[in-house]
Image: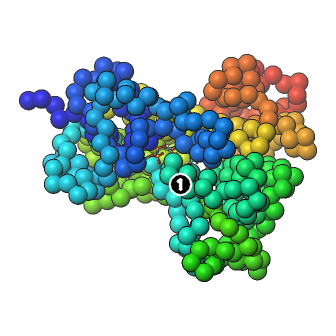
Amino acid sequence: MASAGIVIIGAGMCGGNAAVTLREEGYRERVVLVGDEPGAPFGRPPLSKTYFRDEEDLTAWMVKPANWYEENDVERLQARVEAIDTQAREVVLEGSRKPIAFDRVLIASGGRNLRLAVPGADLPGVLGLRTLADCEAIKEVAVPGSHAVVVGMGFIGSEMAASLRQRGVRVTAVVSGVGPLARVLGDAVGSVMAAIHREKGVETLVDDRVVAFMGAGRVERVLTSRGAIVQCDFAVTGTGIEPAVAVARASGIAIDDGIMVDERCRTNVAAVYAAGDVASQRHPIFGRVRVEHYNNAERQGRAAARSMLGATEPYDDLLSFWSDQYEHAVEYVGQAPRWDQFVVRGSLEQRRLLGFYLGAGRVLAVMGLNRGGDPELDEGGELFAAKALVRNRVEVSPGVLEDEATDLRGLGR
Ligand SMILES: Cc1cc2nc3c(=O)[nH]c(=O)nc-3n(C[C@H](O)[C@H](O)[C@H](O)COP(=O)(O)OP(=O)(O)OC[C@H]3O[C@@H](n4cnc5c(N)ncnc54)[C@H](O)[C@@H]3O)c2cc1C
């Protein structure tokens, strides 16, 4: 009997890369890539940066050109998956009586923006950013001289604040901590980022929260917990995502902050795999982790495809991300949800540094601000060298890390 093939749920960075890998690895059976967004899989980073600022189109961000899928016999289906019948091994589509059979299925359904649970959050003009359509909707209102409130200064909020300023929009940002990215990078770097945004004209309300959006039929102002009332033409919320786990509910697939998978992207149910923003993986180095970054979506999608084909290597990527804001570049490698020491090599004041996150004296993660190179590409760079410190959980004294004379390459071994 012919194999039913592989169904991939979600045609984002992760699902797209999984489909490509299946074909690259020589898989000949049916591959169906089901996604509810229009268009071929692409990477979202330019939606808050270059594409939003009209500096490039999305060509360089496509996983593959649109015609690749047909040429390689990957069936792309624009539809929403309602459920997975793990007994019958079928995927049920919304509004369709015809299920799709599978031998194996990959859940790559990513994340959905969290809605702020405050009055007025559904007013027109309160906008989130995840999809291309979201990006176009913000572009339409982000005209020079308009006034935006940016809610939350994580990655999306702080990149949007920067890009909006670059488009000539007045920006007021409401930040719950000391500054942009403070939750991930710590207060020292958060304060530096806050100063950068202030210099670029972003009015920043720190240690504050939006408690209501108000307006007659459309957002006109926001109210904060400290009592500020900010007039605005529109608001952009960047308050995080939740994993899109709905397809796995009532299927017996284990869920807990994402779909639980092992080192090889396997769920607790045979033939069902998950990867990308939706997956909470048992990582060989970092323990259980759910990652919401581009590099992981790409690589874990590829790893899941290989795993579906029988590969047994664990997915042990070192996990990395970047963020570009104005002329400033942030890079990060490793995983440090908590740390007990932050060691700076370089200068916070000059905004040029490597920062080491230590736990019990060991290097958990390393960040670079305008320094260190790309940890993935720049083999001569300091961040590339620092990867071995993270991988090998090297115990090293802060003084040694701070010392510019120390060659990081020597330390990682
Ligand atoms: C504006 C923006 C900028 C970013 N910039 C960076 C950056 O600079 N650096 C970085 O490291 N990361 C960045 N990221 C994060 C990165 O884009 C994500 O980690 C990545 O998109 C995750 O890919 P994914 O395929 O797992 O999930 P997603 O991109 O969420 O794709 C999942 C797809 O599945 C679809 N789907 C969900 N449920 C169903 C269903 N039931 N049926 C059918 N389809 C379904 C969704 O609609 C979506 O199309 C950015 C994200 C955004 C939004």
* Residue depicted at x 72% and y 34%: 395
User: Does any portion of residue 161 appear in the rendered image?
Assistant: no
* Residue depicted at x 64% and y 41%: 54
Q: Is residue 359 above or below residue 345?
A: below
Q: What is the x, y in percent for residue 163?
A: 71, 48
Q: Nearer the viewer, residue 403 or 64?
A: 64
Q: Nearer the viewer, residue 239 or 37?
A: 37
Q: Is residue 261 above or below residue 412?
A: below
* Residue depicted at x 43% and y 28%: 65
Report the coloring of the rendering. Answer: rainbow
- Residue type at mark 1? Asp
User: Does any portion of residue 103 appear in the rendered image?
Assistant: yes
Q: What is the x, y in percent for residue 69?
A: 34, 29
As drawn, which residue projects farthest toward the right?
349
Q: Is residue 79 left or right of residue 60?
A: left
Q: Which residue is mark 1?
A: 134
* Label 1 element class: helix
